[in-house]
């Protein structure tokens, strides 16, 4: 029991760190939009620093919080090392500080994709120190995550025999009955272990290549190779957030409806397919690179269409089925979690449109792209994270939600849908993405997004305040209804 409580302490730290960083990053998002909208005068250099910190911070913080979700539920089935969880926390915080100093004190601004040779070749916009702080900060952060996934993989192999069994391949092949299939949490965690160990290893390699190039520009790398490695890392890692978040969808809906989420062959095959596709389709980021082998680009397009779909379909369908006529009592937590399915579905549609080569050639560098991923990330992945925060608070304390929390739920849904919509409209107007300055014809949607972003900020602030209230009372209340032994 004591160990469950102290493990939950670490999970709470993951979520509060993630939640607070997301909140601050929203401010930077609003500043960018107000500047693009023509009402705030940001120097272009400042804009690109803010863009860099916003992208890095949002992806890093939501991945970190989502790892907290995975750790929390996966611990019901396997034994994760608490030391590794702590190490990841410490590495994350060190990495964040290094990245912040690199960006704001040393003016580093390559955007979170640090595409080679940009870290070194900045036309003196930033120097060696800024670039190295950023690259090594990312490396430390990445190593922390890598340890976390390696430990999760170790624990899964220990209990289930192999990662293949964690994905339920012995059930797919008929050697084992569906009734004995691993739980949805174990299947999802195994998938994330596989894709993120790959992503983080590739990411570490390309970060080190960049760092050497910054220190000694005579050392060069084939830029096309570097781009492949960079996007293999960035695409997979950013995608993994939703596959960790979805664990909360499975677990929370099962508990609230008192039903089990049936893990059948279709479910298992869907997860295996999404595992393979997620690893392969980063090539949709290279559709404009005509020097890439054509077969890779065609594969990138074809599989992008299919990428998340298998998991999305079984999960959205499963969520509807488990809730249907279950008599579920809705609250802010389960509401956010259920809503995240809509955000996910809604975000994937414009992504599929964009992954079509003919459309991509017109749309790829427009704000259409942030349009789809803000929907998918903010209304999908982040809603899972905030929903889990409400769930955890309810499990581990006697805290009650109030009118403000309900307001925040609606405010968040409305503001993020409107914000993402404003990005999509900008895309249709051919507004380029990542441009500090907009011509007057492009300013309207940006300004609208900046204003509606304030509502998103207020809503997330309420989510975070609720969680802080929970942290303050949880030390005084009985340890939660969550007991490891209950679930064995
Ligand atoms: C609700 C508040 C948010 C606002 C107002 C906001 C605003 C923005 C803006 C203005 C940009 C730059 C668009 C451009 O290319 O011109 C941007 C980019 C980005 N945002 Fe957000 N955002 C928000 C939430 C999020 C969330 C929740 C995530 C992820 C979990 C996220 C991840 C990103 C990423 C990865 C980029 C790309 C950075 C790059 O191009 O290098 N944002 N956001
Ligand atoms: Cu991608």
Image (cartoon, rainbow, N blue to C red):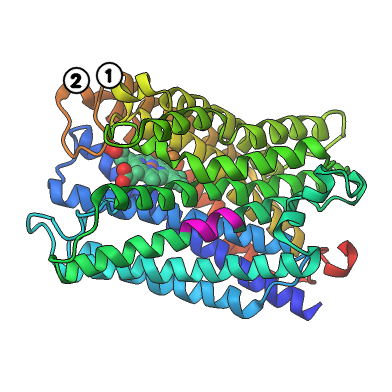
The N terminus appears in which quarter of the rendering?
bottom right
Q: Give the range drawn in magenta.
A: 194-199
Quadrant in the picture for residue 98:
bottom left
Residue 76 x %, y %: 79, 64
Give the camera-side residue of 398 and 36. 36
Residue 308 x %, y %: 58, 36
Task: Return the mark for residue 441.
Answer: 2
* Cβ atoms under marks 1 and 2 closer than 8 Å: yes
Residue 444 x %, y %: 26, 24
From the image, tell me which residue sits under label 1.
Answer: 429
Q: Which residue is drawn at 36% across and 48% down?
A: 228
Q: Which residue is drawn at 54% across and 61% down?
A: 197
Ligand 2's image quarter is top left
Q: Is mark 1 on a helix, strand or loop?
A: loop
Packing grade of label 1 (10 A; few <14, some 14-19, many >=20) is some
| Secondary structure mostly seen in the magenta stretch | helix
């Amino acid at each position: 029991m004591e160990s469950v409580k102290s493990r939950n302490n670490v999970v709470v730290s993951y979520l509060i760190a993630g939640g607070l960083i997301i909140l601050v990053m929203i401010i930077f998002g609003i500043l960018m939009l107000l500047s693009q909208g023509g009402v705030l005068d940001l120097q272009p250099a400042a804009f690109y620093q803010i863009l860099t910190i916003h992208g890095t911070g949002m992806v890093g913080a939501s991945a970190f919080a989502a790892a907290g979700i995975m750790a929390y539920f996966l611990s019901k089935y396997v034994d994760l090392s608490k030391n590794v969880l702590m190490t990841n926390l410490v590495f994350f915080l060190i990495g964040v500080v290094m990245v912040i100093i690199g960006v704001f004190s040393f003016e580093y601004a390559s955007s979170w994709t640090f595409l080679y040779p940009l870290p070194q070749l900045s036309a003196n916009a930033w120097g060696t120190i800024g670039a190295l702080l950023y690259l090594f900060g990312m490396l430390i952060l990445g190593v922390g995550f890598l340890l976390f996934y390696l430990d999760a993989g170790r624990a899964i192999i220990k209990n289930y025999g192999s990662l293949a069994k964690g994905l339920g391949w012995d059930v797919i092949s008929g050697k084992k009955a569906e009734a004995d299939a691993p739980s949805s949490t174990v299947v999802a965690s195994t998938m994330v272990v596989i894709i993120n160990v790959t992503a983080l290893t590739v990411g570490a390699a390309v970060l080190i290549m960049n760092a050497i190039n910054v220190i000694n520009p005579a050392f060069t790398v084939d830029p096309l190779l570097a781009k492949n490695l960079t996007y293999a890392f960035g695409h997979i890692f950013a995608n993994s957030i939703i596959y960790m978040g979805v664990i909360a969808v499975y677990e929370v809906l099962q508990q609230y409806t008192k039903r089990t989420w049936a893990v059948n062959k279709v479910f298992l095959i869907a997860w295996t397919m999404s595992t393979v596709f997620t690893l392969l389709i980063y090539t949709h980021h290279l559709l404009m690179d005509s020097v890439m082998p054509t077969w890779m680009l065609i594969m990138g397009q074809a599989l992008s269409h299919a990428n998340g779909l298998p998991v999305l379909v079984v999960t959205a369908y499963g969520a509807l089925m488990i809730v249907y006529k279950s008599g579920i009592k809705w609250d802010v937590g389960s509401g956010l979690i259920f809503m995240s399915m809509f955000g996910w579905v809604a975000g994937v549609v414009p992504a599929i449109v964009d992954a079509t080569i003919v459309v991509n050639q017109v749309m790829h560098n427009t704000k259409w792209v942030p349009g789809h991923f803000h929907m998918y990330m903010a209304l999908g992945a982040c809603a899972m994270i905030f929903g889990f925060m409400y769930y955890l608070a309810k499990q581990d304390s006697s805290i009650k939600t109030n009118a403000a929390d309900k307001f925040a739920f609606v405010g968040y849904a409305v503001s993020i849908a409107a914000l993402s919509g404003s990005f999509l409209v900008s895309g249709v107007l051919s507004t380029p993405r990542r441009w500090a300055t907009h011509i007057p014809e492009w300013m309207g949607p940006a300004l609208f997004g900046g204003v509606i972003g304030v509502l998103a900020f207020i809503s997330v602030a309420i989510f975070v305040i609720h969680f802080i209230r929970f942290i303050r009372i949880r030390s005084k209340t009985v340890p939660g209804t969550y007991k490891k032994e209950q679930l064995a």
